[in-house]
Image (spheres, rainbow, N blue to C red):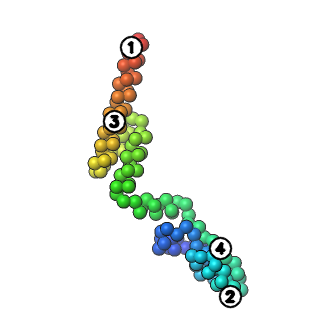
Amino acid sequence: MSTDKSVFKQHPHLKSYHETADGTKFFKPEHAKLHAKSLKDKAIKEVKRPVLESVEVVLEELTPMQKAKLRVRDIKKLDTVEAVKAALEGETAKTVIEAGEQRIRAIQDVDGVLNTSVNEEE
């Protein structure tokens, strides 16, 4: 009984399937049990989708707009102007570019406030 990744590729929303000792695959455990009754080896194995593969499938299924939203979310977490500029390199989505520009302004505003308060203390 081996894991057949093609089952998960053909059925992207499938979380698991059941495989009998002869290698026959079933989506429902009841069907696997019925089939196993006719076999000498009545073992049934539940094969679950590997976690990393499900993440890859989810990313492949995202629309360009959804992917852009993820990039915007990631840009908002960056702490330096250099990091934001690096993230924007080659970017074409207007919403992501705008989010990057806003993040740069926010970082510069915080840096300006910190520099002002340091100078006032001296």
What numbered label is drawn on residue 45?
Answer: 4
Q: Earlier in the sequence, mark 3 or mark 4?
A: 4
Please state which of residues 14 and 5 is positioned toward the viewer in this rendering.
Answer: 14
Q: Earlier in the sequence, mark 4 or mark 2?
A: 2
Q: Earlier in the sequence, mark 3 or mark 2?
A: 2
Residue 1 seen: no
Relative image position of residue 120 (x, y in whole percent): 38, 14
Q: Which residue is mark 2?
A: 38
The part of the image, by quadrant, that contains residue 82 is top left
Please state which of residues 22 and 65 is positioned toward the viewer in this rendering.
Answer: 65
Q: Are marks 3 and 1 in contact (CB under 8 Å)?
A: no
Query: Against 85, is 69 above or below?
Result: below
Relative image position of residue 93 (x, y in whole percent): 29, 51
Residue 50 seen: yes
> How far apart are the alpha carbons under marks 3 and 1?
24 Å
> How far apart are the alpha carbons under marks 3 and 4?
53 Å
> How far apart are the alpha carbons under marks 2 and 1?
86 Å
Query: Against 82, is 96 above or below?
Result: below
Q: Which residue is mark 3?
A: 104
Q: Amino acid at mark 3?
A: Ile
For the C terminus, the quadrant is: top left
Residue at disc 4, secondary structure: strand
